[in-house]
């Protein structure tokens, strides 16, 4: 999966409220939907003097100066560092063929549904995913679903999955802290892959912060491999 394909799938399956081109930059209005949907990025040849143009556009939206940096953008990364931006939240993208993740999972353990049930919204809210991020899910165009996980007959976790081309992206995976390490996340991923397979997807992908060692270990045990990295610069 190329960095360009990953970025395109992420933009389509977790979109900003508004996105526009300003000079050589892409400016996103996130409306509280998360960092990436609120971050600026390069979309053409730029000069250091052009950075001020993006900064002014971000400030006009009232959401601060935030950039997303992907592979091959070392020059921009260095230019932002020289302007006082600090490196923030490095992220790893994982992916695996849908067929490798799909399998039998009881509907009592995890099931797909849309729109999200009230309990799914409650689980997201417990994890800090409130109305602004639910609004991101609602504005996705194309196939999408919520996956509700259950452990010991108790709602235990939830995730959002959406399709772009032949890639299904999983976002907003949350498992209740007291019910972790009991198989809920694994069941949710399996149910997500089953749903993706039914939609004709070839792969399931997701992103996770580098520091989330427990989640990364699970994805790697399931056979997912790192397919990309990015990080933010903030001031």
Image (cartoon, helix red, strand yellow):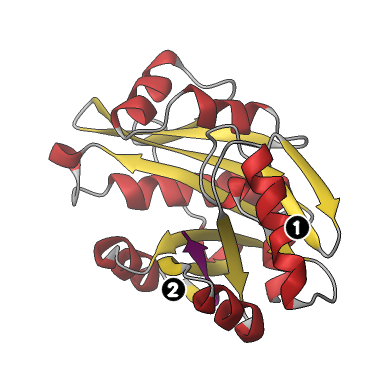
- Taking depth in this image into account, of 45 and 150 the one nearest to the observer is 45
Vertical side of 111 occupied by 38: above or below: below
List x then y, in percent, for residue 205.
57, 61
Residue at image point 52% right, 56% down: 102
Can you tell which quarter of the image residue 30 is in? top right
Earlier-in-chain disc, 1 versus 2: 1
Disc 2 on helix, strand or loop? loop
Left or right side of 193 for 104 = left
Label at residue 53: 1
List x then y, in percent, for residue 21.
84, 52
- Taking depth in this image into account, of 125 and 178 the one nearest to the observer is 125
Residue at image point 42% right, 68% down: 86
Residue at image point 85% right, 71% down: 44
Label at residue 70: none
Vertical side of 83 occupied by 214: above or below: above
Disc 1 on helix, strand or loop? helix
What residue is pinned by disc 2?
223
């Amino acid at each position: 999966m190329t960095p360009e394909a990953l970025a395109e799938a992420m933009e389509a399956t977790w979109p900003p409220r508004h996105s526009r081109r300003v000079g050589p930059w892409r400016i996103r209005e996130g409306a509280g939907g998360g960092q990436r949907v609120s971050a600026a990025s390069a979309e053409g040849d730029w000069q250091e003097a052009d950075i001020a143009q993006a900064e002014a556009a971000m400030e006009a939206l009232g959401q601060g100066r935030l950039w997303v940096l992907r592979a091959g953008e070392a020059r921009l990364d260095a230019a932002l560092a020289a302007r006082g931006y600090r490196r923030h939240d490095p992220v790893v993208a994982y992916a695996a063929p849908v067929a490798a993740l799909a399998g039998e999972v009881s509907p009592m353990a995890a099931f797909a549904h849309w729109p999200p049930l009230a309990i799914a919204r409650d689980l997201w809210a417990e994890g800090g995913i409130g109305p602004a991020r639910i609004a991101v899910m609602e504005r996705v165009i194309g196939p999408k679903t919520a996956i509700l996980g259950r452990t010991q007959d108790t709602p235990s976790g939830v995730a959002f999955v959406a399709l772009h081309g032949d890639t299904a992206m999983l976002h907003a995976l949350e498992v209740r802290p007291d019910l972790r390490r009991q198989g809920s996340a694994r069941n949710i991923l399996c149910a997500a892959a089953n749903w993706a397979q039914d939609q004709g997807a070839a792969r399931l992908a997701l992103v996770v912060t580098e520091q989330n060692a427990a989640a990364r270990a699970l994805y790697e045990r399931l056979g997912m491999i790192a397919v990309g990295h990015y990080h933010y610069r903030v001031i």
